[in-house]
Image: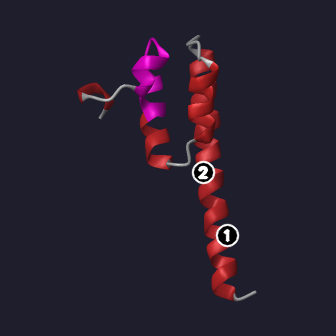
Amino acid sequence: MSEEIRDEGRAQGRAQGRAQGRADSLLLVLDVRGIALTEAAREKITACTDTQLLHQWLERAATATTAEEVFAKGPQGH
């Protein structure tokens, strides 16, 4: 296995780890805040690999009162 392939694999692993960590944090914030999630919304979060999108959702979760507000697109949703 070449060093380049190994480095690429490590980078992918780190990116997946960051995405999983943000998804876990998002689920925790929503749970602590008492915001109910459907199974589809939970799957949307756990399946997401876009760390920037997960970060946006996490920011919204800090003030949202519903799951819909977390996923909303628009001025308050950046």
Q: Position of residue 63 (x, y in %)?
A: 42, 19
Q: What is the residue that sits farthest to the right in this orientation?
A: 1
How crowded pointer 1 is (Cα within 10 Å; few <14, some 14-19, many 20+) is rated as few
* Residue occupied by mark 1: 10
Q: Position of residue 46 (x, y in %)?
A: 63, 37
Query: Which residue is drawn at the image coordinates 63% and 85% (left, top)?
Result: 4
Query: Which residue is drawn at the image coordinates 56% and 42% (left, top)?
Result: 48
Please identify the quarter of the rendering in which residue 20 is found: top right
Answer left or right for 69 relative to 18: left
Q: What is the residue that sits farthest to the bottom in this orientation?
A: 2
- Type of amino acid under label 1: Arg
Residue 49: say if magenta.
no
Q: Main secondary structure of the magenta part?
A: helix
Residue 67: say if magenta.
yes
Query: Which residue is drawn at the image coordinates 28% and 26% (left, top)?
Result: 76
Disc 1 on helix, strand or loop?
helix
**Quarter of the image with the C terminus in it:** top left
Answer left or right for 9 relative to 41: right
* Residue occupied by mark 2: 18
> Magenta span covers which residues?
57-71
- The one of 47 and 20 positioned closer to us in this rendering: 47
